[in-house]
Amino acid sequence: MDIKQLLEELSNVHGAPGFEQQVLEVVHQYTGDLPFVSDHMNNGYLNLTTMDDSKPTVMLDSHLDEVGFMVSYITSAGQIGMQPLGGWVPTSVQSQKFKILNNRGEYVSAVSSSKPPHFLTATEKQQALKMEDLKLDVGATSKEEVIEDFGIEVGQPVTPDVQFEFNEQNDVMLGKAFDNRLGVGVVLAVFDHLEDELNDLPFNLVGSFASQEEVGLRGAKITSRRINPQMAIVVEATPSDDFAKPREIAQGQLGSGPQLRYRDSTYIASPRLNQKIVSTAQEEGIALQQAVRSGGGTNAGSIYANEFGVEVATLGVPTRYAHTHHLFASYRDWQATVQLIVAFLRQLKEEDFTPYHLKKW
């Protein structure tokens, strides 16, 4: 498997929430001989159809979608309204290049616009930029031109237009959609490492590629029910804070290894599972960052509440400038995340799975 080529393709492909089909196509190209299926919600499942009912199941989760927009209206002058799909800050959206998928399956280049400084009053210059101030421009001059010539209608998806780059000097990647195409790449790489061992593991290992995480962890509600795991590892590209906080309190620094999450706004991680991951990292000599997040969330928020409760851990590749066009991430951190998960899974034994039970008092 050409890992760098995989990560480049995953980053460059477009897949706003609800429009993940092309990301699924890229994933399928890298699943080898393992069975891969998808559902009508654009969720993908790797190795699902070979599950042994006599074994417990580990779910290795990632999400396919990236933050984007949806065309919400078109003005008579040909300006295109933008409805956010996922969390954006208006100042990160202004004057950026986007791609709009039109009704012919073609990508149309667009630029996000706002009122230029020449036309701003002194009062307006002091006001904070609002999302509703921003529109997309494809160079058209009328609503009819946008619809008839460009094939753009209300409801079409919009994603950032950025090409992946790899800096060989420091092994740092630059691109869009690292949240969470880096996690998707980790899942595929773990299966590539373990493909010849899958039948000998004391558990079923199922890869999950969920849709619509950025708009409410929706796909994972379905994947967790279908897989029904007893344990899960959620793989993410977690927002790094090394540029935003003093080094002594930063919990996600580029080049300092994967990040293990203990808490966010959607769930509290399994202490038992987190400790086993910490022990594995120490045994393997892998640097590990530990994070207690005050906000944010991942698919863990949907998975851990499935059925009678699922033990879940979240591992992330620290990523600068999440939910913007251009993101940085360390390839070494990505490799260490793969290495840690492979080592953890190889150490799991049947007795590590605790069945649902009620404690008597």
Image (cartoon, grey):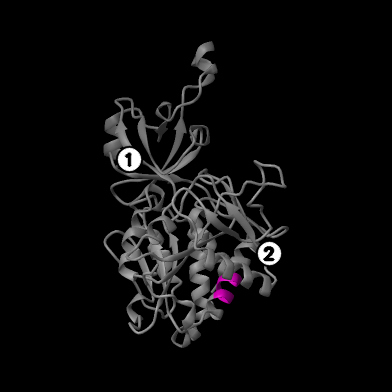
User: Hey, which quadrant is residue 33 in on the image?
Assistant: bottom left
Q: Residues within 10 Å of mark 2 (few under 14, many from 20)?
A: some
Q: Amino acid at mark 1?
A: Phe
Q: Position of residue 252 (x, y in %)?
A: 63, 52
Which type of secondary structure does the marked residue at label 2 adopt? loop
Which type of secondary structure does the marked residue at label 1 adopt? loop
Residue 150 is labelled as: 1
Q: Position of residue 103 (x, y in %)?
A: 28, 47
Q: Residues within 10 Å of mark 1 (few under 14, many from 20)?
A: many
Are the residues at dot 1 and dot 2 in contact (C-beta closer than 8 Å)? Answer: no
The residue located at (69%, 60%) in the rendering is 168
The residue located at (41%, 60%) in the rendering is 23
The residue located at (64%, 41%) in the rendering is 244
Q: Position of residue 175 (x, y in %)?
A: 56, 51
Visible residue check, residue 11: yes
Quadrant of the rendering where the N terminus is positioned: bottom right
Instruction: Decide which of 115, 93 is in the foreground and name it.
Output: 93
Q: Amino acid at mark 2?
A: Ala
Q: Which residue is mark 2?
A: 287
Tell me the distance, in whole angstroms, between the alpha carbons under discs 1 and 2: 50 Å
- Of badges 1 and 2, nearer the viewer stands 2
Instruction: Decide which of 71, 231 is in the foreground and name it.
Output: 231
User: Hey, which quadrant is residue 131 in on the image?
Assistant: top left
Extreme-top residue of the structure = 122
Q: Does the magenta segment cover residue 47?
A: no
Quadrant of the rendering where the C terminus is positioned: bottom left
Magenta residues, start to end = 338-344
Q: Does the magenta segment cover residue 341?
A: yes
Extreme-front residue of the structure = 361
Extreme-bottom residue of the structure = 200
Q: Main secondary structure of the magenta part?
A: helix
Q: Which one is earlier in the sequence, the residue at label 1 or at label 2?
A: 1
